[in-house]
Every structure is written in C-alpha cells, then in structure tokens.
Amino acid sequence: TALRYSPRSYVVRFDLRLPACLDENDTAVITRFVRALRLLLQKADDEKIRQGKRVHQHNLRFCWVREWGKEGRPHYHFALMLNHDRYRTLGSFEEVEGNLSARIKQAWATATHQTFQDASRLDLIQYFWTPR
C-alpha cells in the first residue's frame, strides 16, 4: 500500500537496539517510536508551512521484525517508506536536528527513554525506489 500513496518512494532501513536497562514488550516500544517519529515529521511539515514553503505529504509507512541476538536480547530490523518528493536523503548523521536522520534518532531516544547521544548509534541505510 505504500506505493499507492507514494509511487516514488524513499526507503530507509535500520536496526533498533534496546538499551540493556529497558525490558519492555515490542509493541510498546515500537508504538512509542512510530508515534514520536510521526510527531517529529509533522512538526517539520508545520514549520515549512509556516515559512510559506510547499510541503508534500510524507506518507509514512513502515514495517519491522524482531530478531534475537546471540546475547539473548531482541533488536528490530525496521524499514521506513516515505514519499520521495518529501524526503530523499537522511541528511548528515552528525546533526542533532533538522533532518531525517536526526528525527529517527530523536524518536528512538524518546521511545527508549535515552538521551539523543545514547540512542544515536543506529546503522542507517537508505534506498531509493521509483517504479518505471
């Protein structure tokens, strides 16, 4: 269904690792992550609108799967699908705000009750997909 809303899609794949001190069920953590990310994306859209800029809908879609590591703790393989007309790059990984990379890290920090620095150790991989 992601392609129905965004025929030109931008996909970001990354792994989310729970901090050792957090022992919660998957649904609660992932729900908080997605909720926080949606809010951050909406906030960015609202700011562009206030500046009088044209804003394409981001059309956030996602999928995830849990995998158990050798240490006996779960981690999550996550894929975000966004409208390529709105997002087409993660931006600088060093930034703490203002780009998609930072928003993903901020959302994970919120979901796991960590600082941005602790939550920012994500392996972010970006893909581009446009049907012919």
Image (cartoon, grey):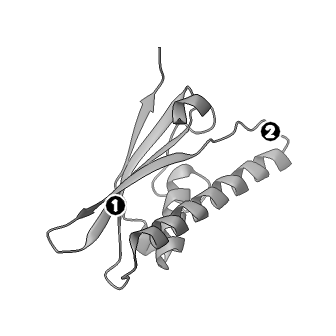
Disc number for residue 53: 2
Position of residue 108 relative to residue 102, above or below, is below
Q: Which residue is mark 1?
A: 76
Q: Is residue 11 left or right of residue 43?
A: left
- Give x and y (percent) for residue 9: 52, 32
Q: Which residue is drawn at the image coordinates 81% and 45% (left, top)?
A: 49
Q: Please indicate, yes or no, whether residue 116 appears anywhere in the rendered image.
A: no
- Of badges 1 and 2, nearer the viewer stands 1
27 vs 100, nearest the viewer: 27
Residue 108 at x, y percent in the picture: 48, 67
Residue depicted at x 52% and y 66%: 31
Counting from the top left corner in percent of width and height, residue 117 is at 45, 72
Direction top: furthest residue: 132
Q: Residue at x 62, y 54 (%)?
A: 98
The image quadrant that residue 119 belongs to is bottom left
Tell me which amino acid carries mark 2.
Answer: Lys
Residue 45 appears at what percent x and percent y?
73, 48
Q: Residue at x 70, y 36 (%)?
A: 56
The kind of secondary structure element at disc 1 is strand
Q: CA distance from mark 1 to mark 2?
A: 35 Å
